[in-house]
Image (cartoon, grey):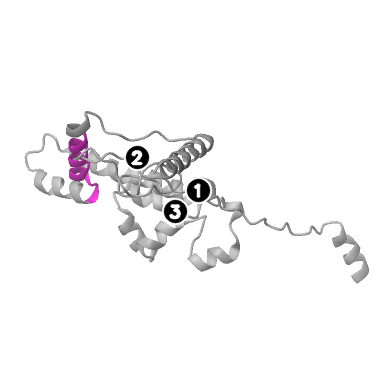
Amino acid sequence: MARKLKRKLKGTYKKPVQKVKKLRKRYIPQKCQFILANGERCKNGSTGKGTLCKIHGGERIIKENLLKNDEIPKELLKAVKYEPSYHPIYYIELSRSGMSSTEVAAMFGVSVPTINEWSETFEEFYMAMEIGKALHESWYLLQGKDNLTNPRFNTGLFKFMTANKLGYAEKIESKNINMNAHGVLLIPNKQTEDEWSANVQEIINNDTGEVENG
């Protein structure tokens, strides 16, 4: 009986597939391309593979390094308390009701740095946070639109909430400063990897030339 069962199972057994560790891409930092109100260029280094620093809207997450669900080691999931089948979906649903990332983190029972770490590691959660930001902002905008003709609507509180939760006051102020100084707000376009590498090489060559000439 045991021999028959062994022969039967022999054809159905499959050797487990070994997951290949994903290689993380790294990029040489370059100077931030943002122009300040006094006409000088920002002296901070850029973040990620972009051309802006974190202060001026640079994206430090390198999307090529994000892990897809089938690339996530099980031991990593346990270490960071992340559940792929739960957290991305419910992040979007909670954001749809107007919750901020801080409020969602509290619902998940984790800290804000923890969900930020998830978004910098897992591709699906990164996408969920991007969608969640839009849903969160949209919720507040709908509250304002639905009460445009309501004389009892608390516009002062609405302005306070949107300024503090969405940063509307900061967005307007930053735009006005740069528009007054230069006529346009300088936000460099996103680059392909080849364009980025070419720009970095040009900067290195220019810097080397300046040293030699000096």
Main SS category, magenta section: helix
The magenta span reads: 165-178
Instruction: Name the residue at 33% across, 49% down.
Output: 44
Residue located beneath label 3 in the image: 119
Residue 167 image point, x, y percent: 22, 47
Distance, label 1 to label 2, CA atoms, is: 16 Å
Total labels drawn: 3
Q: Please report whichever mark, 3 or 2, sits nearer to the chain's N-terminal start.
A: 2
Residue topped by disc 2: 33
Under circle 1, the secondary element is loop
Quadrant that contains the N terminus: bottom right
Q: On screen, 31 above or below 145?
A: below
Q: Which residue is mark 1?
A: 27
Q: Is residue 175 magenta?
A: yes
Q: Is 173 covered by the magenta stretch? A: yes
Mark 3 and mark 2 in contact? Answer it, CB < 8 Å.
no
> Is residue 1 in sight in this rendering?
no
Nearest the viewer among 143 and 136 is 136
